[in-house]
Amino acid sequence: MNIKSLLIGSAAALAAVSGAQAADAIVAAEPEPLEYVRVCDAFGTGFFYIPGTETCLKIGGYVRFQTEFGRDLVGSSDWDSWTRARVTFDAKSDTELGTLTSFIAIHGESSRGFPGGATNSLTYDANGSLIDHTDGFYVEEAYIELGGFRVGTFLNWWDDDLIGETEIASTTTRFTSARYVYDAGTFRAGLSVDEIESTKPNGVGISGMLGAVLGGVSFELLGAYDTELEEGAVRAWLSAEVGPGTFELAGWYASGPNVYFEEAEWSIAVDYAFQATEKLRITPGFQYFSDRHLINGNDAWTGGLTVDYTVVENLALKATVNYYDEDIAGDSVTGFLRLQRNF
């Protein structure tokens, strides 16, 4: 074999080896493009697009620490400290029929009513309202809403209170319901069909709402009828911006025992939320009850003071002291100190 043949054979062998190695080489895959979370400003602050969808999601809630004095849920001590956590998920998207919403609120409390949180349970009444708040979580609200229609378990309009922490505004406020609200901005109206199963099967409650906002004045009228007990209640509420604060006046009437309001035959409440500084609000309040607990001649009244102070953004301190006097039960002083972090 001459040198020329040897060189040609060597080159062929190298080419074959190089071809085999090239066939076995690992080629790195192209990285997947990242999809960053986008802010959704179509439904207010705090919403963002769920990646890969056109649905906007907002996660919120609060953590609350509170110490109450004057009574606790089981009457075993003169004070009680407890903690609450609430987490909400609000998903919204635009459709040809209006805004589609699904809302979930998860609610839990620890050590409320039982010293040291010794009991680990939740007790509900027949209407699904929580009686004892101890260690545990439950779904407080869960509903679907399209346009003005809403179905699910949620808080009724009767859950809305005055600014202060003095008045007693309702009896039961949480139902599994179907409702419709027409909202034209300055005027709104709604009707709700509520499930009631407290004393009779197949019970239904009907509640309605009319509201209006004119300048700095707001008005709302509620009416409700309990088909189980065949009694009803109404509530009128007026709010007006007066000077450096907000004036509120509310009145209630109950025809008899009913699930919505049976705290008195009739009652009237007033308060004034004085905005002392940007961070400090002081709210004195008063309420009178005629035939308290629907007992003839058992009149009662309560008066108190609530102070709200913003420590820093999203961290608030609230304190209240109330004096209560009832013909049958006598008088008492109650109150609480609350620290709450919202997110």
Image (spheres, rainbow, N blue to C red):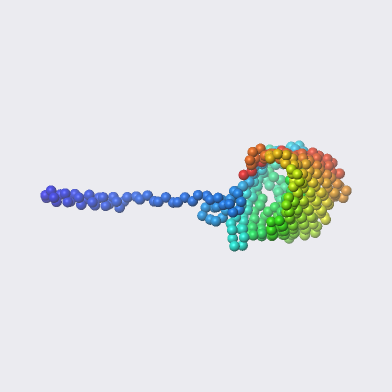
Nearest the eye: 267 or 213: 213
Judge whether residue 318 can be spotted in this image: no
Looking at the image, residue 242 lies above or below residue 257: above
Q: Quadrant of residue 188?
A: bottom right
- Give the residue drawn at x 24%, y 52%: 16
- Give the residue drawn at x 79%, y 55%: 234
The reply, left or right, for residue 6 in relation to residue 170 is left
* Quadrant of image for the C terminus: top right
Judge whether residue 180 can be spotted in this image: yes
Q: Quadrant of residue 149?
A: bottom right
Question: Horizontal and vertical percent for residue 118?
Answer: 68, 40
Looking at the image, residue 100 lies above or below residue 60: below
The reply, left or right, for residue 85 in relation to residue 14 is right
Question: Horizontal and vertical percent for residue 195?
Answer: 72, 58
Q: Residue furthest left?
A: 2
Question: Horizontal and vertical percent for residue 157?
Answer: 72, 53
- Give the residue drawn at x 47%, y 50%: 34
Nearest the eye: 254 or 50: 50
Question: Horizontal and vertical percent for residue 261?
Answer: 78, 52
The reply, left or right, for residue 160 in relation to residue 2 is right
Q: Residue furthest bottom?
A: 96
